Image (spheres, rainbow, N blue to C red):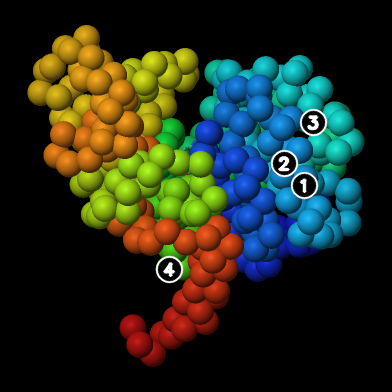
Amino acid sequence: MASSLTATYPWTKVPLISCAPMRLIANATLAAAVSIAGGLGFIGAGSDISTLSSELFQARDILTKANISTNTGVLPIGVGFLIWGAPLADTLAVLRKPENIPAAVWLFAPRNPNQLKDWTEGVREATSNKTKIWIQVTSVREALEAVKLASPDVLVVQGTDAGGHGAAQGAGITSLIPETIDAVTEHCKSSSSAPLPFFVAAGGISEGRGAAAALCLGAQGVCLGTRYLAANEATIASGYRDAVLRASDGGTTTIRSSVYDQLRGTTEWPAGYGGRGVLNASYRDHEAGVTFEDNKKLYDEAVASGDKGWEGDRARLTTYAGTGIGLVKTIMSAEAITQEVRDNALKVLSSVSVSKL
Ligand SMILES: Cc1cc2nc3c(=O)[nH]c(=O)nc-3n(C[C@H](O)[C@H](O)[C@H](O)COP(=O)(O)O)c2cc1C
């Protein structure tokens, strides 16, 4: 492993800004744009790899035109998998092709911890160790488990403010990152076979101040999901994106719950996870005791109404997003978002002065 996280990915700039592998939303165009801006973009394959080859083909085309040098012959992007559902053997068959080898593979949400070991060993073998392994964890316990079983190159430490799926019960990054770093460092010191991974912070970081704070907590890079929902290159319905832009005060206007999964029919998630999204009529009706059947009927009607299903007081459609939603105010290119977050994080870090405190 290189001496720093950005040295691992030679086209990236300090500090490393990455875009979360949001299933259906973070496709080739978004992932490539983030990497072209000196970050690391992830394609969100999720649990379904039916379009993976074509997404990689498209990403390769965009990245080749941008002429990014990776030194090691890998594609300068990552791919994220939800390993409770993604098929390992078929995935390895795609990643094994020399033209498809990504710089990073992101693993999240195993059905049982041993899947982390199987996936890590499989990817490392298929890509001759060229692909670095990122594992997203939601607690100190999961971090230690991941390090012991899979020795990842990077641990993405996801706090409870994160949009989309995460631990139903969890902590924010302010306490989670330092405690995780301490516990993992202690373990790696006492075990000669366990190299210390890099740490990336995720959850509630929408702009430079949050990114700077995460770096102060000890992370070497940051990952943003919610902010990139408002990127030009995100594959997202305009009603969804407008709902993100309208929302503020995310601690009160978003909620982590399994209600949206039930209504959408995405119920294969392992126990212990919930999806954070904008709190709307679907959740309020569920809490008020409306039966699942009635709520589902209203949900399906909202789906049929298209973008209107995200509008007004009776908006019902799933709008996965994190508590940092109030800091997402305008649609920008992924390149501009990546640069802005990176530049502002550096500005904040250099402007903190003890004399002003
Ligand atoms: C719309 C949306 C979809 C997501 N989908 C995935 C996914 O498919 N796989 C995954 O590992 N994480 C997914 N996440 C979670 C991200 O990996 C990440 O932890 C989160 O976006 C970070 O918090 P933030 O949204 O506050 O930036 C998703 C997040 C969002 C907002």
Task: Give the Cα distance between marks 3 and 1.
Answer: 16 Å
Q: Is residue 149 above or below residue 3?
A: above
Say if 168 sits above or below 232 in the image: above
Residue under pointer 1: 61
Q: Residue at x 88, y 56 (%)?
A: 71
Relative to 102, 157 lies left or right? left
- In the rendered structure, which disc, 1 or 4, sits on the residue that comes first in sequence? 1
- Numbered mark located on residue 209 in the image: 4
Q: Residues within 10 Å of mark 3 (few under 14, many from 20)?
A: many
How far is mark 4 from mark 2, CA to CA? 33 Å
Give, as a three-letter code, the residue at label 4.
Answer: Arg
Image position, residue 352 (x, y; %): 44, 81
- Point out residue 201 in the picture as x, y percentages from the top left corner: 52, 52
Q: In the picture, residue 128 is in which quadrant?
A: top right
Q: Is residue 85 visible?
A: yes
**Left of 106 or right of it: where is 306?**
left
Residue 214, horizontal then vertical, whole percent: 49, 60
The residue shown at (67%, 56%) is 35
Dividing the picture into quadrants, the one containing residue 356 is bottom left
C-beta proximity under 8 Å, tags 1 and 2: yes
Q: Amino acid at mark 1?
A: Asp
Q: Is residue 240 left or right of residue 33?
A: left
Q: Is 155 located above or below residue 297 in the figure?
A: below
Bin the neighbour count of mark 1 within 10 Å (Cα to Cα): few under 14, some 14-19, many 20 and up. Answer: few
Task: List the residue tagged with mark 3.
Answer: 95
Instruction: For mark 2, give the secondary structure.
Output: helix
